[in-house]
Each structure stands twice: as structure tokens, then as C-alpha cells.
Amino acid sequence: SLCESGKRYIPPHMGQDRGTVGTQKTEELERLKKHVKGLINRLSEPNMASISGQLEELYMAHSRKDMNDTLTAALLDACVTASAMPSRLMMEHVLLVSILHHTVGIEVGAHFLEAVVRRFDGAYRREGQGKERENLFTIVAHLYNFRVVQSCLIFDVLKKLVGTFTEKDIELILLMLKNVGFSLRKDDAVSLKELIGETQSKASGASGEFQDQTRIRFMLETMLALKNNDMRKIPGYDPEPVEKLRKLQRALVRNSGLGSETQLRVSWDNILNAEQTGRWWIVGSAWSGAPMIDNSHHLHPQKQLSGTVGSEILELARKQRMNTDIRRNVFCTIMTSEDFLDAFEKLLKLGLKDQQEREIVHVLMDCCLQEKTYNPFYAFLASKFCDYERRFQMTFQFSIWDKFRDLENLPATNFSNLVDLVAHLLKTKSLSLSILKVVEFSELDKPRVHFLRKVLNILLMETEVEDLGLIFARVSDNPKLGMLREGLKLFISHFLLKNAQAHKSAAEANMLRERADLVTKSLQGKASLRM
């Protein structure tokens, strides 16, 4: 791996001498807190766009750590009270988190989620009389409703509550099911069925332990109504407010996307043990559930303990042939970043211009290809630059063309990493399929067939159907791309669909055929985006 330092990462803000943090910084932080609190106090559905926009600007102007801490504190002050928070108000506050999670970066939602889960864990252990616990649990429910977390977190905590099964647990289970039960059924009916089975057996075994059986009966009836998709059986259930706010959410984050790749796939215990095991779900990666922070591999760049770059990083820069000051600066910035958003901000602050700025792309490509195993960090950083300015798209395009011309000379790991990087940039619409216009489809040799087959297979099999149609439709109406369209259609039918059955299961082969049919129609400009 590129990062082979055995030192434990300590965030710079923890390594600073408190005495050096002057009054100026303290005053600035106080002003920021006042500003954010003022925005949160004015939050409502009609001004959601304005307030989320102002908070985005604050994220650009201040350190993300200060903003995350300040925003989380202001939201918890507003939402977590001793009395029950009005549901509409609660939804609007969580919707704001979701919008920033999708427009600023996933660590906004991750930071807020961790604070909520930790505080809930404390409130759950204490036997308080207020509604703090219920308010916190409702926040978790709406983080799922507004696509900040995946359903696995909700099932995880519900199974824990079924395991302990006290009267307090039953009330919390009912609260969660009322808020998200039908969404859980839609997302993962199998897990819901398993949960209902576990609850029924637990309830029958604990029938003598409860003086009042009515709440248990009500909970089982609620679960049965969910199982049978019967909304009428759940008193007070009204999906309309959530649906209305989801519509607003789609309008406000349409360019950033609401796909599953931005939803945090993390378990309850992962969050509570984050101090010990690391926050792997915040790293720029697909949320596959595989830890991204693994001390044996160092899959993401490590941050130094101080502002100066350590000798190991400089030695690494030399080994990677970073032979100019600018390349070394870019390399060390990437290698000492906390995550891809941190890297993006710091690289912009280098203030590079023209040819110097293009070195960001060249160094990033080099780092990505040199990794022993593919690291999504670089792909997320590349996407961020492509989305930021069109000139970065052009530089990445030229850089990829250079690699494409030299495919036969690339070592196997470089080749494989390039496949994954290009597939990611196409899947996220950071680059257009027009980058393949340099391909001579009539004169393809083995390395190029191998490369295109892998990229297109990832694209077809791992992209959401709606996005897939759009990706291919983007090159459907440009008269200059006629050769590319014909080449892609031929390649897909000849190299992807032929013998698909031999390399894939029947279900996968069938899915590939359906998606190949969709993209072929998209290339002709007549895609029906729903299958």
C-alpha cells in the first residue's frame, strides 16, 4: 500500500497544544455557534432551501470539524427535549441533516448519527422520566426515512430490543415501527419477517412476566399489519408528511443523488465502538460493510501528527517519483488527508493554476494505480474534482486516454485499479461515456477487449437502473458520437452477452441481458428507464 506508517492517527485538533489556540479562534467559534443556532431556530419547510444553502456556504468557509460539532450540538439542543418533540418539527430537522449529508458530504450525517446513537445509549441506560430517549430514537427512525442510513441499522437495534424485551423496549419497538415499519417492509421484507418471528417467540416465552399484556398484543398486531401491508390497522399512521418532505428532499439534492452509495451501512455496535475500531463508514468508499480502516492495509491516507510532513511521507514521495515541488506538495497533501473531502479542500487551498493544477490529476491517477489493492478513496476524490469544475473532467479524460494507449504495458494491479476508477467515474456520472470515443472498436486487441469488458460489466451490473439509462442516453443525441454508439452496441452484444451464461449464474445472465437491452435502447434515444 502507499501508506505504510505504523503510527496511530491522531486528529490534528487533538495534537495541538491548547495554549496555542488563541482567543481569536475561540471568538470565531462563538460567532459560528451563534450563526448556526440562529439558522436552526428559523428552520421550517418553506425556508429549507435557503437555510441548507447558507449552511453549505458555512461548510465551505469553516473547518468541517468545527461545523460538524456546531451543527450537531445545535440540532440536538433543538430536538432532544424532556417533552415529546412535535413530529413535523422533528422531521424537518432530520431532513436538513439529510440534505447536507448528500450535498456537503457523508461525514455530516455520520457525525450526527454517532452523536445521536451515543446519547440514546446513555439515555436508555438511565431510567429517566422525560421523553429524551423517545426523541432520540425518533431521530434515528427519520435518518432512515430520509436515506442517511440503510435498513440494517434499524433491524440491528430492533433485534437488540427484542433480545432484552422489557416494557421500555416494547414501547421503543412500537415507536420505530410506527415511523418506518412500511419502509422496512419495502426495503427488506425477509429481515422484517425474521424480526416478527423472533418477536412472536419472545412474546410467547415472556407472557407471564408482564402484568399488562395489552402493549404486547398491540405490538404483535402492529407487526401483523406490517406483514400483511395493512396500513389501516395501525392507529394514527400517516405516511403523507414523510412523503411530502421526501419530495422536497429530491428537489434540493437532485444533482448530488440519493442512491444507496451515500447511505451509511453501519451496525449499532460499530457506532458505539467507533473510538476503538475506527469510523470506517466515513471513509470515501462504497458502504459495503467491509471496514475501510484496517491497520494491516492502511486503505486510506493517514494524517500526520503535526502540521509538518513526516519523513516517511517524503521518502514515499521520492519512491513514487514525485520529482517536482508541486508534485510532492500534492502527493503529501493527499497522503496526509483525513478523508477525500479533507483532501479536496486542502488541494484547492494549494492555489495551483493551469499546468500546476493539472498535476493534481496526474498525481491522483498515479497514486490510485500504484495501490496494491484498489482503494475507493481516490475515485471519490476524483469524482469530487470532476463535479467541481469541468476543466478537471477534461484533464481526467486526457489522463485516462494516455493510460488506455499504454494498456498492454500496465502491470496487472495498475490495470485492475484503472478499471475500477474508470467504472466509478462513469457510474457516478462524473465523466461521460464519450471518454470511450477514442476506442477503435474495429481494431480491438486483447488488453483493450479485457479492459472494456470489465468496465462495461461493472457499469451494467452495479449501477441503479434509472442511472444506467441516463448514463447511456447522454451519448445518444450527439451526431459526432455515432461511431461510439455503434461500437458500444456491437461490443455489448458480442463480448458481454455471448457466453454470459458460462461465466455467470442464470439470474445474473438474465439481469445482464435485461440491462444490455435497456442501454441499447438508451443509445438509440428511446430508453424506457423502468424495467
Image (tube, rainbow, N blue to C red):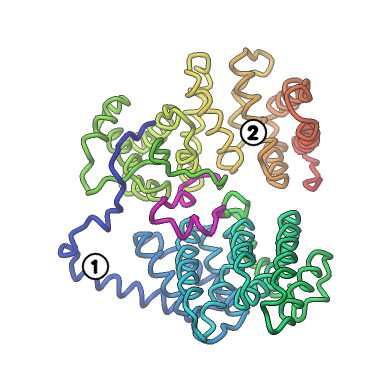
Magenta-colored stretch includes residue 280: yes
Question: In the drawing, does residue 4 fall left or right of residue 148?
Answer: left
Q: Earlier in the sequence, mark 2 or mark 1?
A: 1
Residue drawn at (78%, 21%) of the image: 498
Tag 2's secondary structure? helix
Residue of label 1 = 25
Residue drawn at (30%, 28%) of the image: 322
Give amino acid for label 2: Ile
Q: Quadrant of residue 316?
A: top left
Residue 155 in the image: state x and y as whole percent: 64, 60
Relative height, residue 73 to residue 183 (above, below) = below
Q: CA distance from mark 2 to mark 1?
A: 47 Å
Give amino acid for label 1: Lys
Image quadrant where one finds the C terminus: top right
Tag 1's secondary structure? helix
Residue of label 2 = 458
Relative height, residue 447 to residue 289 (above, below) = above
Residue 397 in the image: state x and y as whole percent: 51, 32
Magenta-colored stretch includes residue 170: no
**Magenta segment boundaries in residue numbering:** 264-286
Q: Is residue 491 visible?
A: yes
Residue 208 badge: none
Residue drawn at (37%, 41%) of the image: 301
Image quadrant where one finds the N terminus: top left
Question: In the drawing, does residue 68 fall left or right of residue 29?
Answer: right
